Amino acid sequence: MDYSKINELGVTMKGLQVDKKVNFSIFKAQEKADIIESKGKVGFLGHKIIKALAVEKDIKKLEHIMCIKQDLSKKYKDYSIQNGDIVIPVFPGKDQLDIIFMEDIQAEDCVYNDSNLIIRVTSDKVIPKYLYTILNSSSIRNRILKLCTKNTRQARITVAMLEQLSIPIISLEEQEEIINRYTNAVKQLNQVQNSIEEMVRGGNAL
């Protein structure tokens, strides 16, 4: 089996630094959005919001986030959210690493902030969701967590760490099969969890 490092499969980058003077990850009022827009700011989408969006199966638009409506300059273009992006937090939880795959989300007016690392596949050797599936395996997640906690007080994932990870490369047909099996397994797990939640709520109602 062949292996390729992530830096051979795509681009890995850190999101743009957030302006600390203005909190514009989520706009709570239209007036605030108007003020920020007048200053030429671009909406930054934080990792927690990305996670919330990613778990919503039917979401098509970021309607509950007032994105800044402006043409993204060249400076921001590479950091604008794109379907197929794999998002990893710079600072993971103590024993938890949430890896997010951006899919069926329209967010042309938002860019990633600096709490996120983005892997964007550019190679035709690998399907983006296959790479996400491999990265989301327990062995890879544990390896990343082990690397980012070594010789440091604060767990921190870097671009260099991700770029050097080796990924097994199989045929595109086999990649599609793994994606389908993984997706079906997740659906079944969610169905079981939903059934349990319904039973628990029913018991609490008595």
Image (spheres, rainbow, N blue to C red):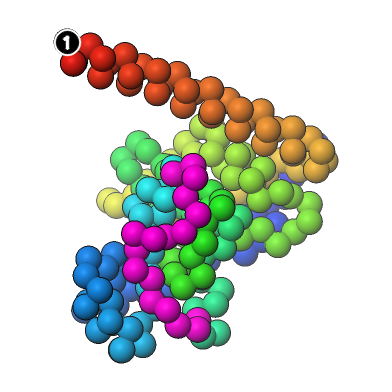
Badge 1: residue crowd in 10 Å (few <14, some 14–19, many ≥20): few
Residue 34 is drawn in which quadrant? bottom left
View extreme (bottom): residue: 39
**What's the residue type where badge 1 is placed?**
Leu
**Residue 115 visible somewhere in the drawing:** no
Magenta span includes 71:
yes
The C terminus - image quarter = top left
What residue lies at 31% left-to-right and 14% top-to-bottom? 199
What residue lies at 25% left-to-right and 84% top-to-bottom? 35
Residue 145 is drawn in which quadrant? top left
What residue lies at 33% left-to-right and 21% top-to-bottom? 197
Residue 27 image position (x, y, % from top left):
26, 68
View extreme (front): residue: 206
Residue range highlighted in magenta? 56-72
Relative to 80, 43 lies left or right: left
Query: In the picture shown, does residue 44 fall above or below 180?
Result: below
Residue 56 image position (x, y, % from top left):
44, 44
The N terminus - image quarter = top right
Magenta stretch, overall SS = loop
Relative to 123, 141 lies left or right: left
Residue 62 image position (x, y, % from top left):
42, 60
Query: In the picture shown, does residue 155 fall above or below 190?
Result: below
Query: Disc 1 designates what residue?
Result: 206
Disc tally is: 1
Magenta span includes 200:
no
What residue lies at 56% left-to-right and 51% top-to-bottom? 103
Residue 30 image position (x, y, % from top left):
25, 74
**Element under disc 1:** loop
Residue 11 is drawn in which quadrant? bottom right
**Residue 93 visible somewhere in the drawing:** yes
